[in-house]
Amino acid sequence: MERNPMRRQLAIMRQSLFDQGHVDEQFVQLEELQDDANPNFVEEVVTLYYRDSARIILNIEQALERKPFDFRKLDAYMHQFKGSSSSIGAKKVKAESTLFREYCKSGNGEGCMRSFQQLKKEYATLRKKLGAYFQLARQAGPVETASRPK
Amino acid sequence: MLEGKQNGQVFKLPKVILLATNITNVELEKAKAAGFADTVIMKPMRASMAAACLQQVLGIGKKRQAGKNMLNGSMALQGLLCGKKILVVDDNMVHQRVVAGALKKFEVAVECRESGKAALKLLQRPYCFDAFFMDIQMPEMNGFEATHPIRMMESKANKQMNGGMDKDSGRKGEWHVPILAMTADVIHATYDALNAGWMDVSKPFEEAKLYQVVAEFFKSTRSNCFT
């Protein structure tokens, strides 16, 4: 149990990321790759993810403006997005990506649009939560070892 | 290390590693039977799995002494993999970064390329890689297509050394490239493999054996076990 109140707060925040299903086991994998040689690994990878996913989201938005929908293209974009999201352990976002792809495969345009809206919501929430988490982490200073969520 | 072939030097062809998101034993067997993949790893790739697979396919650590202290299992693995040079080919930059991060943890020298084409460019001049982590589902050129030239080099090398012994290593010409490729969708990857003509049968890789290796290495370590 952390004595430092900031670190305690950080641990609580971290736990809720898991409890609320925003991140999964893969996030722990990233944490475990963080060490003295790579003290900001998690945040670096997540930042890379934001850049990558912002681009893909834009592509999807543009693709959804063109009718009729090019489901193959949409699916290809989402394949990329899902890959990135699962690489950082973004659980809810990944689940929504899967749903979107299913709609693509069945040629369900309405479903795609609905799913995409939901995905953007989840994505925004994730960014907000991770943003707050990393900000606190920076203030709290380096944490020793990652601990597994209960 | 893959060195110049003109002057009759030895080929030591790299191993290529297959990663997949989810896989049943049936699909695993199919992918392996498709010929080019010796092992399938789930994507997104876990640090321990990457290192363990590498260790397994590179045949390192087989001569571990009985009763050796496994408390520093991960450090032992690190020592074994230290200095190995790996090429990661993945069009997904985020995943590429994760794979590179995982391998670097074990002091593996990592190079990354975003496409099969870029990877093949690297192969055109002398290089020394011990393994490839190759994404299957890439646009333009998929992992199977990118791996094909490596296979060709291998059969050439085998033919050149057929019946003869390599004077440096004393090995006969039997280079085999265990391939570890990354895919988020094993079923489609298997179809792609079949379509790409990779029908030759390769040695089946026992998944259970792999987990055993991982378990052995990590069971006595700190609680950060990867299962």
Image: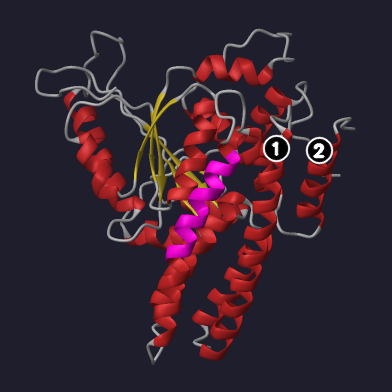
Residue A35 drawn above or below residue A119: above
Residue B86 position, x and y percent, is: 40, 30
Residue denoted by label 2: A6
State whether the magenta stretch is mostly helix, strand or loop: helix
Q: Residue at x 54, y 83 (%)?
A: A112
Q: Residue at x 50, y 30 (%)?
A: B103
Q: Secondary structure at mark 1?
A: helix
Residue A9 drawn above or below residue B168: below
Residues B155 and A57: in front is A57
In the image, taking residue A110 as reference, residue B3 lies left or right, namely: left
Q: Earlier in the sequence, mark 1 or mark 2?
A: 2
Q: Most extreme residue toward the front, as rendered?
A: A139
Residue denoted by label 1: A139
Q: Is residue A45 visible?
A: yes
- Amino acid type at circle 1 is Gln
Q: Which residues are magenta?
A: A42-55
